[in-house]
Image (cartoon, rainbow, N blue to C red):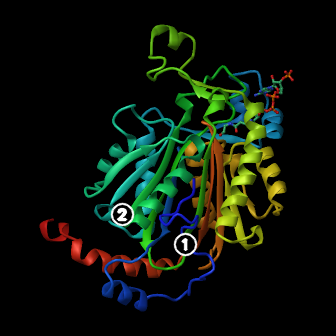
């Protein structure tokens, strides 16, 4: 599936390179013309990582494993684990507040809150509703997306579609996972991999030819058994037996996923680039799902990019599921000066199986904020009512 409200495969036309200094004329054109095509640009980001760190040596005390095996087979040195009072929604709310602060956006100005998680607080209500309420995003709709580790790519695509279709102007996409509560701590093939955390971005309408340039989503439900939490849903409701059998925890056929992951990431990255009419040489950095250092290296080689272009933080976080790509994106943005017009490629794979990629062109964020002001002026009712 391709993000495109016009059906031609592109979210924003890549060949029209944005002028870095679009400010006043953008605002004026918006005021003159109430309806126009919008693109979707990221204007703020934030992450939250729980303070408790579980390193490989701590795991050596729990299961039959060792630091050398984990490092050489996965690249992971440590992962963060949620505290007893923390949940997916509590971590995601902190990340979301940070993203809103970064974007200088009042939560009441959000139109939509999209939460992407495989480890929600509850089956019902949606975790997005809990976050919406804690943020005070009183004018926003809220829903969850479950696309496992590709959740953020699906969420960003959905936000882009809402913005391009005119259904929303300011969307919060927040990903959070408390995977530590869903792993079997006696299964050394899975428990070493996963960590907890959250990250969020604010996505806003802009008339700049920037933001999300193209997206690609894919799935193969026929291999769902390769990564599964079997019990707790309608197929296998919770019973004493399901709990005793550890059927509420992650089961994975790691080798199977490994092979599919490299192929799916490389292909979806190429497809997203081709839809944006760009080549990998036009990409400043690739922000990929942090599942395994060896998968990242294989994808890097398949795409023909340098190690510097492939952003990696798996060593410190492990696999944080849907939060992995936005945590990496936030760290990358916070530690690098990205120029207006530079391109980033986001790519992921995960349970389902699912995969996807997004090409992003960095927008002139100051200009997007000016556009925001002109859009909000007529609708800011709450300023009058308090
Ligand atoms: O977000 C998407 C979710 N999942 C993934 O991305 C997972 C993708 N797959 C992987 O990352 C890798 O397949 C794993 C890291 C899970 C496993 O690495 P591997 O190189 O595929 O190892 P393996 O499963 O083939 O196991 C090799 C050996 C086995 O021993 P024998 O049978 O050769 O004697 C395992 O029992 O390593 C053993 N092993 C371990 N040894 C020490 C498995 N886990 C551990 C461990 N510590 N934690």
Instruction: Give the residue pinned by disc 1.
Output: 12
Residue with the most extreme top position: 241
Picture layout, residue 274 above or below residue 299: below
Residues 304 and 316: in front is 304
Instruction: Give the residue pinned by disc 2.
Output: 168
Q: Earlier in the sequence, mark 2 or mark 1?
A: 1
Picture layout, residue 321 above or below residue 278: above
Residue 41: x, y in percent? 49, 69
Residue 52 in view of the camera: no
CA gap, disc 2 and disc 1: 17 Å
Bin the neighbour count of mark 1 within 10 Å (Cα to Cα): few under 14, some 14-19, many 20 and up. many
What is the tally of numbered marks visible in this picture?
A: 2
- Residue at 73% in and 43% down: 261
Residue 65 picture quarter: top right
Residue with the most extreme front position: 7
In the structure shown, which secondary structural element does the residue marked by tag 1 occupy? loop
The answer to whether marks 2 and 1 mark residues whose Cβ atoms lie closer than 8 Å is no
Q: Ligand 1 is in which quadrant of the figure?
A: top right
Asked if the beta carbon under badge 1 is closer than 8 A to the nearest atom of ligand 1, the reply is no
Residues 315 and 11: in front is 11
Residue 121 in view of the camera: yes
Residue 132: x, y in percent? 33, 50
- Residue at 51% in and 57% down: 156
In the structure shown, which secondary structural element does the residue marked by tag 2 occupy? loop
Nearer mark to the viewer, of 2 and 1: 1
Q: Is residue 239 left or right of residue 351?
A: left
């Amino acid at each position: 599936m391709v993000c495109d409200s016009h059906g031609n495969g592109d979210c924003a036309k890549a060949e029209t390179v944005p002028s870095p200094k679009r400010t006043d004329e953008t605002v004026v054109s918006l005021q003159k013309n109430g309806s126009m095509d919008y693109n979707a640009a990221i204007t703020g980001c934030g992450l939250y990582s729980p303070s408790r760190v579980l390193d490989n040596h701590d795991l050596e005390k729990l299961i039959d494993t060792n630091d050398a095996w984990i490092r050489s087979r996965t690249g992971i040195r440590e992962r963060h684990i949620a505290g007893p009072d923390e949940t997916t929604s509590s971590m995601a709310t902190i990340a979301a507040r940070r993203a809103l602060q970064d974007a200088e956006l009042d939560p009441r100005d959000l139109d939509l809150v999209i939460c992407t998680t495989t480890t929600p607080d509850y089956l019902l209500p949606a975790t997005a509703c809990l976050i919406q309420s804690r943020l005070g995003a009183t004018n926003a709709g809220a829903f969850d997306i479950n696309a496992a580790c590709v959740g953020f790519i699906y969420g960003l695509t959905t936000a882009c579609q809402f913005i391009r279709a005119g259904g929303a102007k300011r969307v919060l996409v927040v990903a959070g996972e408390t995977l530590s509560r869903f792993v079997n701590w006696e299964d050394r093939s899975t428990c070493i991999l996963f960590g907890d955390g959250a990250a969020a971005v604010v996505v806003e309408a802009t008339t700049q030819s920037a933001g999300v340039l193209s997206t690609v989503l894919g799935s193969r439900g026929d291999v769902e058994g390769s990564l599964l939490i079997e019990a707790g849903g309608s197929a296998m409701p919770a019973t004493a037996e399901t709990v005793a059998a550890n059927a509420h925890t992650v089961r994975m056929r790691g080798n199977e996923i490994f092979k599919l992951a490299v192929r799916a990431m490389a292909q979806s990255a190429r497809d997203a680039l081709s839809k944006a009419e760009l080549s990998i040489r036009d990409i400043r950095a690739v922000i990929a799902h942090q599942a395994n250092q060896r998968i990242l290296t294989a994808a890097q080689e398949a795409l023909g990019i340098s190690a510097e272009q492939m952003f990696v933080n798996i060593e410190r976080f492990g696999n944080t599921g849907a939060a992995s790509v936005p945590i990496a994106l936030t760290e990358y943005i916070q530690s690098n000066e990205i120029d207006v017009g530079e391109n980033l490629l986001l790519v992921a794979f995960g349970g389902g199986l699912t995969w996807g990629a997004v090409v992003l062109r960095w927008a002139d964020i100051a200009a997007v904020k000016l556009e925001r002001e002109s859009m909000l002026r007529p609708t800011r009712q709450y300023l009058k009512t308090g």
